Structure formats: structure tokens, C-alpha cells
Image (tube, helix red, strand yellow):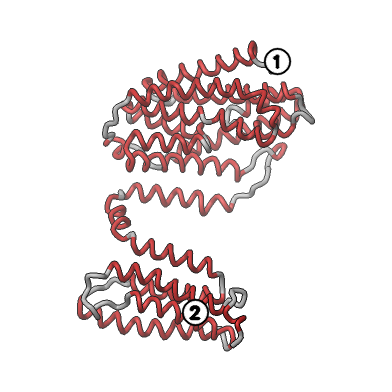
């Protein structure tokens, strides 16, 4: 016998083994879920699923040498057998569930895929299928607890992200090609996603853990968006002001170590110049956040679920419009003033986000821009961005929230400016 038939490079032998294992993976779950059923009362168990996976692998192997139609004929034969078994089972125990039948069809298809496609994908899909089949109590329980407006919010989020976002062009339009529809809509999606994630994190994990989780997530993406959403939330739930203030400060404070990490990759001398100022400003956010967090005793904010919209699309649209205006003004200043407008551009960029100006100045220095100017521009952008978030809490949020957030933010900006002026080589 040719031993090459049993090498993995030949594929056939081992891929048939994988097809059999795929059936066993799904069959173990189905057999376990029906372990209390009487012998012979189940339509399919571990042996049937294993054989169906093996059957799919053998059919695909033969189809490679005969005709691809053989795979379709094999599936048709399997469907006829399953239909007869289902009708007999339904008459005896009145079970109309077709989950097991769908699982058998998937097992057959994955067995075929293991032989004529990618066995890694086939095994991964088998594990995911088994997990879905095993999650029946959790999935049904989640559906029972899901409210209609929460489902509507989830579908709208999928509409604006999965459907609309890929359709938008990722290129500049308008004066100076400054308006990028994809980037603007991506910001709308991001803000809406943070609102949606925060709502369910608070509902599932409680106020303390939910707000903390959402804040850390937003700190890695857009603390400005979280500040906007938490400011709105404080209007409906002023009792949560301690936790919301802590979440805003944690999220906004994460901006400073993120700046240093980006610069360590792009421009290490600039990162070494900036880290004392960034560390001081970060401490100005984190320490009050820790204080507010420890002051609040977790309560059950039932009124959040009743009054809070899971998907704050109106706020996201307004922020996207403002971002478009800022992008246009930033590009205009850059064209009108050239290099002399760097600091003004930094301040304007800070009105929306710090990352774009950090990346730009980190790449430009020291070849096209001095390190001092680049460092000063980044500090200005971070300070302006912090003041913008402070203004959001004052004009949008409840007064209990604004009092707790405004002073730490303002103090952090002042402390950073003093260190930059008197204790740092930036000037």
C-alpha cells in the first residue's frame, strides 16, 4: 500500500478523519442534551451525527473524481431520510423542533468542506455550531428579557453600521477635499455603539460594573462620545452622578497614556519629551475618578431601563455634523497659514479628537517640524479636548455631574500648562 496516502500533504485520509470528528463534536452536544430520552426515541445522536459528517466527507471525495452533482444528490438523500424520521417522531411525541435536522444538514456540509475546502474553517464552524446548540437556555432566556424597543435599537445599529457604513466613499469631498463621508459616518456609528453598549452593560452588570466597563472601552476608542452619552444619561439619572463622573474621568484620562503609546511607536524622542506632562494630566483625571468611585454605593437604577434610550442616534448625528464642520475648518487653516498654523490647527483638532493631530505631528517631527512645536501642539490639542468634554458636562449634563467633572478637568489642564511652562523643555 502506498504510504503517501496517509500523509497530511495527501489530505484525503486525514481530512476524512476530520469530517468524522466534526460529526462527533456536534453529535456529543446533541446526545448530551437528549441523554434522558429513551433509547430509540431520538432522531439522531452521537453515532448518527458522526456518520453524517463522515458521509459528507466521503461524498465530497467521490465528487472530486466523478461529478460535483454528487454532493447535491447526497444532501437530497439525507433530506428525504430526515423528513421521514421527523414525521414519524412528530406523530409519536409531537415535537416540532427542527433544530436537530438543521444540525444534521450543517454536519453534512461541514464534512464536505473538510475534504474539498478548508478543514480548519470546517472544524471552527463545527465548534461554533455546537456552542449555539448548547446555548438554548441562555438564548431563550435573553429573548424573554429583551424589550421591543431594545430589539429595535439593535436593528437600527446594524442598519447604520453593517448596511450603510460600507456604502459610503472613503475619500475627500468639498473644499480642499476636507469632508470624508466614511470617517464622519464612522464617528456616528461609534457614538451610537457606545450608547448601545453602555445601556446593556449597565442593565446586565449593574451601575458600577456596567459604567466602568463602558468607560474603559470608550477610553480606547472615543472618550468624547462617552462624555456626550453620559452627560445625557445624568439628566435622567442624577443619582448616578458619582458613577457617571467617575466613568467620564476614567475614559478621558485614558487619552493621555494612549498618546504616549502612539508616540512611542512613531517618535520616541517626542514621547520622552511629553511623558511628564501626560502623566501629570492623567493623574488629574484618575485620582478624582477613584475617589468618586469609592464614594458611591451601588444601587439598583431601575429608572434607567424605563427612560433611557439604548441608541442615542440624535446625539450621534449632531456630533457627526460638528465633526464635518471641524474637519473643514482644520483643512482651511492648514491651507491658509501653512506651517505657522500648526498650533491653531492643533487647538481646532482638539475640538473633536486628539488622535489625528497626534499621528500627524508625530510623523512630521523632527523632519518637517521641530520637536518643541510638535510637543506643544499635542499638549494644546489634549487640553482643548479636555475643555470641550468639560463644557459638554456643564451644558448637557446634570449639575451634580458637571460639578464633579469640571474641577478635576480644569485642574488637570492648568497643572499640565504649568508643568509645560516651568518644568518641561517644551518652551
Mark found first going from the N terminus, 2 or 1: 2
Single out the residue that lies furthest toward the right: 367
Tell me the quarter of the picture where residue 209 sits.
top left
- Could you tell whether 20 is left or right of 151 in the image? right
Label 2 residue SS: helix
Is the residue 338 above or below the residue 1 in the image?
above
Percent x, y of residue 225? 49, 34
**Looking at the rendered structure, which numbered label has been put on residue 409?**
none
- Give the quarter of the figure containing the N terminus: bottom right
Label 1 residue SS: loop
Percent x, y of residue 259? 60, 31
- Could you tell whether 390 is left or right of 336 in the image? left
Comparing 204 with 19, the one in front is 19
Residue at figure coordinates x 67%, y 26% from the top left: 345
* Contact check, label 2 and label 1, Cβ < 8 Å: no
Report the residue marked by disc 2: 57
- Could you tell whether 265 is left or right of 384 in the image? right
Is the residue 424 above or below the residue 270 in the image?
above
Percent x, y of residue 105? 41, 75
Residue at figure coordinates x 57%, y 31% from the top left: 352
**Which mark lies nearer to you, 2 or 1?**
2
- Give the quarter of the figure containing the C terminus: top right
Report the residue marked by disc 1: 427
Comparing 235 with 1, the one in front is 1
For disc 1, the neighbor class at 10 Å (few under 14, some 14 to 19, many from 20) is: few
Residue at figure coordinates x 53%, y 75% from the top left: 15
Amino acid at each position: 500500500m502506498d504510504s503517501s496516502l496517509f500523509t497530511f500533504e495527501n489530505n484525503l485520509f486525514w481530512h476524512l478523519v476530520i469530517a468524522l470528528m466534526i460529526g462527533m463534536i456536534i453529535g456529543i452536544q446533541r446526545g448530551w442534551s437528549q441523554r434522558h430520552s429513551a433509547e430509540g426515541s431520538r432522531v439522531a445522536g452521537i453515532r448518527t451525527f458522526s456518520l453524517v459528517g463522515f458521509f459528507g466527507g466521503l461524498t465530497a471525495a467521490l465528487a472530486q473524481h466523478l461529478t460535483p452533482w454528487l454532493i447535491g444528490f447526497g444532501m437530497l438523500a439525507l433530506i428525504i431520510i430526515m423528513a421521514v424520521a421527523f414525521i414519524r417522531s412528530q406523530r409519536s411525541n409531537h415535537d416540532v423542533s427542527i433544530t436537530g435536522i438543521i444540525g444534521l444538514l450543517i454536519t453534512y456540509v461541514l464534512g464536505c468542506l473538510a475534504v474539498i475546502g478548508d478543514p480548519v474553517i470546517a472544524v471552527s464552524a463545527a465548534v461554533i455550531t455546537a456552542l449555539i446548540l448548547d446555548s438554548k437556555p441562555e438564548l431563550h432566556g435573553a429573548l424573554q428579557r429583551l424589550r421591543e424597543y431594545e430589539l429595535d435599537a439593535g436593528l437600527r445599529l446594524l442598519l447604520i453600521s453593517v448596511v450603510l457604513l460600507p456604502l459610503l466613499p472613503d475619500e475627500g469631498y468639498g473644499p480642499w477635499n476636507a469632508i470624508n463621508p466614511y470617517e464622519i459616518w464612522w464617528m456616528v456609528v461609534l457614538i451610537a455603539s457606545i450608547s448601545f453598549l453602555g445601556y446593556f452593560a449597565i442593565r446586565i452588570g449593574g451601575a458600577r460594573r456596567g459604567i466602568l466597563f463602558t468607560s474603559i472601552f470608550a477610553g480606547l476608542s472615543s472618550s468624547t462620545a462617552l462624555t456626550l452619552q453620559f452627560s445625557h444619561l445624568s439628566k435622567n439619572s442624577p443619582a448616578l452622578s458619582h458613577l457617571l463622573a467617575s466613568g467620564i474621568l476614567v475614559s478621558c484620562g485614558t487619552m493621555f497614556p494612549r498618546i504616549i503609546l502612539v508616540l512611542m511607536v512613531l517618535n520616541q524622542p517626542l514621547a520622552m519629551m511629553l511623558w511628564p506632562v501626560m502623566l501629570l494630566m492623567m493623574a488629574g483625571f484618575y485620582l478624582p475618578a477613584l475617589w468618586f468611585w469609592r464614594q458611591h454605593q451601588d444601587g439598583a437604577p431601575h429608572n434607567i431601563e424605563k427612560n433611557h434610550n439604548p441608541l442615542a442616534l440624535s446625539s450621534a448625528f449632531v456630533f457627526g455634523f460638528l465633526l464635518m464642520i471641524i474637519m473643514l475648518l482644520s483643512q482651511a487653516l492648514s491651507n491658509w497659514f501653512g506651517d505657522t498654523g500648526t498650533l491653531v490647527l492643533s487647538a481646532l483638532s482638539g475640538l473633536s479628537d486628539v488622535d489625528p493631530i497626534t499621528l500627524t505631528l508625530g510623523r512630521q517631527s523632527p523632519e518637517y517640524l521641530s520637536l518643541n512645536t510638535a510637543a506643544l501642539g499635542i499638549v494644546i490639542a489634549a487640553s482643548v479636548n479636555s475643555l470641550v468634554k468639560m463644557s459638554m458636562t456643564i451644558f448637557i449634563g446634570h449639575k451634580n455631574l458637571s460639578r464633579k467633572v469640571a474641577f478635576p478637568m480644569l485642574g488637570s489642564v492648568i497643572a499640565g500648562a504649568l508643568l509645560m511652562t516651568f518644568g518641561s523643555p517644551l518652551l
